[in-house]
Image: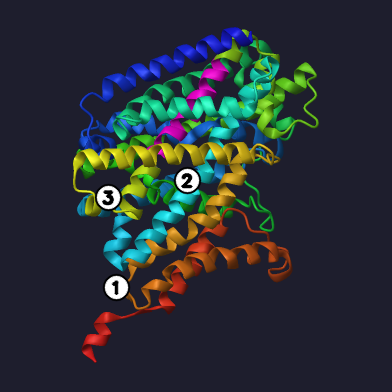
């Protein structure tokens, strides 16, 4: 079966290169960075589903039902509030300023130090988060296919990163928009087919399956104990702010939105994308419950199996060859759709935020050379993180990624909030990076000692909000009210 699965993997990869060839004809730097701002909004919206879900959602959300039941739904509800904020608050700002990198706003508002601080935090966040998402895909492929062929994990990772590097190398974001469409299709197809196969094997109707899930304790949606990190109000607030920072303040996701022709189309994109995303996340939660019911009904012992391995374990060993092939194609689609946009977004951010390529390299051809060197370098670092992390995987990756986001995106949230909701100017601009480092450090201490300090309270993903608030306060301390100064 491994050979058959590998054959489908090769065919799928060839299809991506066909799309690359079609979308990268006469590609320029403008094509790479902005897609010439000609992407149809409905194509962007549909493709962003795959980019948002990633391999982590594909595996970790269903697997995490075993430990947290359906309480992840609280985060999904928060997504809706977050995307409304993006559509009505952030997108109008980005389109008004005609930004290529969204962190250019910080430079216009606060100066170079804030600009580079926001970009550097994004680069760190995306390198770690997307590398872990891609790692999960490689981890599953390695266990169920390549280990039996005695192929080392580092070689598997290298080949997959090279594939992504090659098909994004010329067309950049224009290619990514269209490959994401293909990848979303395969991801959703895999999800739906797996659900159908399990229902057919169980020979139960949906009502009976739901009652069985309920009897086995998997249908809890809202955690009412405020001490726990998945308390429902924490989940909703966390989902909202995770969406704002990991989509609205994230160059990877916003670069796709900014390829739309105008603001109205970008907003249409967000509204349709949100509707589909919520529905798909509900399906992933239901799949998690289905997998556990299936395991119990078939006497499959899941004791000692990491939650990230529950879905692939059942798909490969118990659902048959067809389900295994569908699973692998869906997983690879999810992994590629996350990593390809990240390589492009990180390259864009480094070019526009860190080295300011348009200011220092005037010639179009030289700009292209610099951009390609950065693209390859980012891919190399991406690969190194995957190989290093392979020795430390011991938790559901979706929780690890959100923990990382709580620390790295918090200062970005504070910077944008301070810029958009106050008229104050930073007096000591060189202290902005210090504030952006101090806030996560304080959050780490608060999280570590929260039970002692706050009567047994433990922080979940809402630590992101605290981090942003601390950054806001820190910026308040190093700023001044210019209007008041003029009156005096």
Q: Is residue 190 visible?
A: yes
Front residue of 104 and 416:
104
Residue 216 is left or right of residue 55, and the answer is: right
* Residue 436 sits above or below residue 245 on the image: below
Task: Kindly identify the residue that appears in the image at 59 percent across and 51 percent down.
Answer: 403
Q: Quadrant of the C terminus?
A: bottom left
Sequence-first disc among 1 and 3: 3
For discs 1 and 3, the disc positioned in front in the rendered view: 3
Q: Is residue 218 visible?
A: no
Question: Magenta span covers which residues?
Answer: 326-345
* Residue 104 sits above or below residue 274 on the image: below
Which residue in the protein does label 3 denote? 357
Which residue in the protein does label 2 denote? 126
Give how far across and how far down residue 343 sits, in percent.
Answer: 41, 38
Measured Cα–Cα span from mark 1 to mark 2: 30 Å
Q: Secondary structure at mark 3?
A: helix
Q: Secondary structure at mark 2?
A: helix
């Amino acid at each position: 079966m491994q050979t058959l699965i590998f054959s489908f993997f090769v065919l799928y990869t060839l299809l991506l290169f066909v799309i690359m060839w079609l979308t990268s004809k006469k590609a320029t730097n403008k094509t790479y960075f902005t897609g010439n701002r000609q992407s149809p909004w409905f194509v962007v919206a549909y493709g962003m589903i795959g980019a948002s879900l990633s391999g982590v959602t594909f595996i970790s959300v269903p697997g995490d039902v075993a430990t947290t039941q359906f309480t992840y739904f609280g985060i999904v509800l928060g997504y809706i509030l977050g995307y409304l904020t993006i559509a009505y608050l952030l997108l109008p700002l980005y389109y008004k300023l005609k930004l290529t990198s969204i962190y250019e706003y910080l430079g216009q508002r606060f100066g170079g130090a804030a600009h580079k601080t926001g970009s550097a935090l994004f680069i760190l966040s995306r390198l770690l988060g997307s590398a872990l998402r891609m790692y999960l895909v490689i981890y599953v492929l390695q266990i169920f296919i390549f280990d039996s062929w005695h192929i080392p994990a580092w070689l598997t990772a290298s080949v997959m990163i090279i594939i992504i590097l090659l098909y994004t190398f010329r067309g950049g974001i224009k290619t990514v928009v269209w490959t994401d469409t293909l990848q979303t299709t395969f991801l959703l197809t895999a999800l739906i087919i797996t659900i159908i196969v399990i229902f057919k094997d169980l020979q139960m109707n949906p009502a009976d399956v739901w009652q069985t899930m309920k009897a086995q304790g998997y249908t809890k949606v809202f955690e009412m104990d405020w001490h726990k990190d998945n308390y429902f109000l924490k989940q909703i607030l966390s989902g909202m702010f995770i969406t704002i920072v990991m989509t609205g303040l994230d160059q990877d996701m916003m670069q796709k939105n900014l390829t739309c022709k105008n603001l109205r189309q970008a907003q249409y994109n967000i509204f349709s994308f949100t509707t589909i995303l919520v529905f798909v996340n509900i399906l992933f939660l239901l799949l998690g419950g289905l997998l556990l019911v299936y395991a119990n009904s078939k006497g499959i012992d899941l004791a000692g199996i990491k939650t990230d391995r529950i879905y692939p374990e059942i798909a490969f060993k118990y659902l048959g060859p067809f389900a295994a092939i569908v699973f692998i194609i869906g997983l690879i689609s999810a992994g590629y759709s996350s990593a390809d946009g990240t390589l492009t977004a990180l390259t864009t951010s480094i070019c526009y935020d860190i080295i300011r390529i348009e200011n220092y390299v005037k010639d179009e051809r030289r700009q292209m050379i610099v951009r390609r060197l950065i693209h390859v370098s980012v891919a190399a670092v991406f690969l190194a993180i995957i190989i290093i992390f392979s020795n430390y995987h011991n938790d559901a990756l979706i929780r690890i990624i959100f923990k990382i986001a709580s620390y790295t995106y918090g200062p970005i949230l504070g910077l944008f909030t301070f810029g958009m909701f106050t008229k104050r100017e930073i007096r000591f601009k060189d202290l902005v990076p210090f504030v952006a480092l101090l806030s996560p450090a304080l959050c780490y201490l608060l999280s570590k000692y929260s039970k002692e300090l706050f009567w047994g309270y433990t922080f979940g993903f809402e630590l992101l909000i605290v981090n942003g608030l601390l950054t806001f306060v820190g910026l308040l301390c190093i700023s001044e009210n210019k209007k008041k100064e003029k009156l005096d």
